[in-house]
Amino acid sequence: MLISLAKIFLVVIASVLGGIAALLFIPINKQGRAFHWVARTHSKFVLSICGVKVKTTGAENLQPGVSYIYVSNHASGFDIPAVIAGIPDQIRIVYKKELEKVPFFGWGLKYGKTYIAIDRERGTEAVRSLDEAADKIRNGASVLLFAEGTRTKDGKLQPFKRGAFNLAVKAGVPVIPLTINGSFKILPKKKLRIVPGDITLVIDKPIAVLKDGGKQEELRLMEEVHQAITNHYIEQ
């Protein structure tokens, strides 16, 4: 437990430094690339000090220069750093707006204007956040969304929500089912003990999207992505 607390302390320090770096890079943060470089460097450092190795399979399914919506399961606090470090793409994260209150780290998120804040307590603001995400995608960025909405409590897949698929239909870009295996045991929800281990990212083939296809298209996407992730997911 003491080792875990020491690792958490180092992660906090790294996050503070990352937030400061993000703030300093704002003047040169063209199209979010500088911010993403900071985030990727930070993610690799966090994974390294915590003894977490990331393996990526299916990267051949990605086409350079194409924007995607990555839709993934969510099992651990290490999912985001694993995705940022392990996938060779300019991925933008949708994060909870309350994180902006965290000193330095949250300020970097807020003023870096690269990732997308979502206020889940206000429906109108949540819709506006999805519109902002759609604009970023059209301008050449990819976005990561967790289909379950929150982390699993027991290592099993939870029911999917429609938000990610609503965004996909709005943006009209391909959806990539992304399966994250192995992260649950490293740091489950509401736990402080970090257990070193391996995370595997499985990148599936892109699924074409019918833009403005409405609810029916959203449900079709949700079913296909759920099936793809189920095929690869290993319950933990």
Image (cartoon, rainbow, N blue to C red):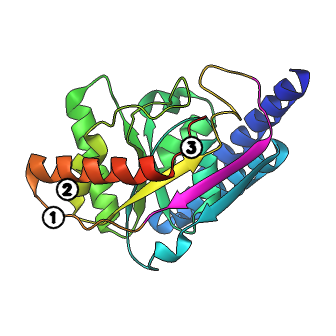
Where does residue 98 sit, x and y in percent of width and height? 46, 27
Give me the residue at 33% from left, 28% from top: 120
**What type is the residue that disc 3 sits on?**
Ile
Residue 185 covered by magenta stretch: no
Give me the residue at 39% from left, 33% from top: 149
Labels 2 and 3 touching (C-beta < 8 A): no
Counting residues from the start of the chain, the first of labels 1 and 2 encountered is 2
Please tell me whether mark 3 sits on a helix, a strand or a loop: loop
Of residues 200 and 136, the one nearer the viewer is 200
Q: Is residue 212 left or right of residue 153?
A: left
State the residue position of label 2. Answer: 169
Distance (Cα) linking label 2 and label 3 = 28 Å
Distance (Cα) linking label 3 and label 1 = 30 Å
**What type is the residue that disc 2 sits on?**
Val
Give me the residue at 63% from left, 54% from top: 200
Where does residue 235 sit, x and y in percent of width and height? 56, 37
Quarter occupied by the C terminus: top right
Labels 1 and 2 touching (C-beta < 8 A): yes
Q: Nearer the viewer, mark 3 or mark 1?
A: 3
Q: From where the camera sits, is residue 195 visible?
A: yes
Please tell me whether mark 1 sits on a helix, a strand or a loop: loop
Q: Is residue 62 left or right of residue 221?
A: right
- Residue span colored magenta: 193-204
Where does residue 145 sit, x and y in percent of width and height? 40, 47
Total numbered badges shown on the rendered structure: 3
**What type is the residue that disc 1 sits on?**
Leu
Query: What's the mark number on residue 210?
Result: 1
Query: What's the mark number on residue 234?
Result: 3
